[in-house]
Amino acid sequence: MRVAYFDCFAGISGDMALGALVDAGADFQALQSELDKLGLHDEFELTLDRVTKRGISAADVTVKLHHRHHRHEHPDHHVEGHGRGFGEIKRIIEGSGLSERVKRDSVAIFRKLAEAEAKIHAKSVNEIHFHEVGAVDAIVDIVGARVCLELLAVEKVYCSPMPTFSGTVEIEHGTFPLPAPATVELLRGVPWRELGIVGEIVTPTGAAIAATLAEGFGPMPAMSVESVGYGAGKKDFGIPNVLRVVVGEAAHSGLAESSYSAEVAVIETNIDDLNPQAYEVVMERLFEAGALDVYLTPIQMKKNRPATLLSVICEPEQVYDMSAIIFSETTSIGIRIDRRARICLEREIVSVETEFGPIGVKVARYEGDILNVQPEYEDCRAAAAKHDAAFKRVRDAAVAAFHSSR
């Protein structure tokens, strides 16, 4: 399986993504031919140049517009009331001769971008309009990036954490802080790493491409590297302003090709003075708040005092909510937080019919092959009580029903 890794060590924008993918091997002439299918060729010209950014040679792809308007200072931002709306852009893409996958993913990126702007401005998605100039620019960048991934036969995309930056930007509504509101909204739940550049190094278009297409954000997955591309940004921030894209074949070892979720947070605290009855309450509250898992481990603390290790696994953006619950419901006065990569099998819940009624069954797959089948505990428990049957009999009936239906 061919994968692409977006290494955003200096950020990401639409033109940087386009340049990096072309530099990684996507045929530029084929890209232009595919973009012609949008029916917008009278509005722009795509050019490719070679530039050096702080010692790194990179592809510089530029969208040159065929009208008298000047490029907007911040074309990635969107306003209400004028320009091309999401509905029109959706019709342009879906009415083109591009492949179904390119059309589907390109529309998904624009939808995510429009939803972010709509939330910020308290508008509906249909009220959000892309600047006349910025709309063409964004269409070319977004559709072009997705076309390049198809030209490179990339099946899955992964991305590095995002670098932090600060400053301000001038947009239609005035002076806004960086990261731009849309960028922050688009990258909710995505890990960031501290860089501290002054200036916009992650644009809303770049954020939308990454947030929509990436399977996960973290270290580069195990792979055999086939090509590396560098896409140039237009400004100089004192570092090589380029996006690196690594393309290759995913490693065929163990679970390397299973579903990938980049990072989870692990919260831990040692507790030796809590009424044991309270653990049920704190676990219920943590699960209700969205914890992926909560578990208790018996430990020995200093002076051989018996204690309990409370561990919570959650999404990184949930850390503070989970911490608040732990502090409010336990006697803990300090917690530890760790970030860990994880690999998960693809899974789904299917319903099977048994003599005890419908039972949900969790099915885990690896490369399409079923590796594990587990009936849902609560379903089996309820059915066993309702029919006055042994729990294991209900469970076995669900497993048998699943396999007989294949």
Image (cartoon, rainbow, N blue to C red):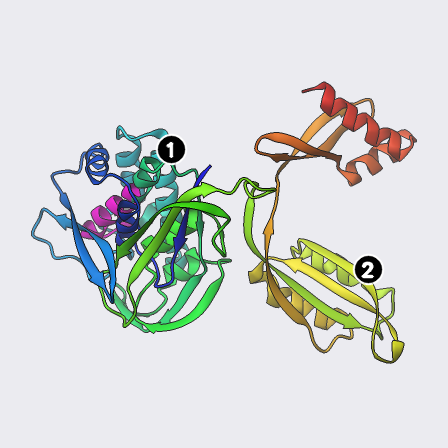
Q: Would residue 8 appear left or right of 350 to someone viewing this image?
A: left
Q: Which amino acid does label 2 sit on?
A: Glu
Q: Position of residue 204 (x, y in %)?
A: 34, 57
Question: Magenta residues, as a range?
Answer: 129-144
Q: Would residue 220 appear left or right of 256 to someone viewing this image?
A: left
Q: Position of residue 17 (x, y in %)?
A: 31, 51
- Residue in the picture at 27% in, 65% down: 173
Query: Which residue position is annotated with label 2?
Result: 280
Residue 314: tell me if it is visible: yes
Q: Which residue occupies the extreme left position in the image? A: 68
Crowding near the residue tagged with mark 1, few <14, some 14–19, many ≥20 C-alpha atoms within 10 Å: few
Magenta span: chief secondary structure: helix
Q: In this view, does 333 lie above or below 370?
A: below
Q: Position of residue 385 (x, y in %)?
A: 88, 35
Q: Is residue 331 above or below residue 288?
A: below
- Residue in the picture at 83% in, 75% down: 301
- Residue in the picture at 84% in, 30% down: 394
Q: Position of residue 206 (x, y in %)?
A: 34, 54
Q: Does the magenta segment cover residue 135?
A: yes
Query: Which residue position is annotated with label 1?
Result: 101
Q: Which of 225 and 28 is in front in this view?
A: 225
Q: Distance between the residues labelled 1 and 2?
A: 47 Å
Element class at badge 2: helix
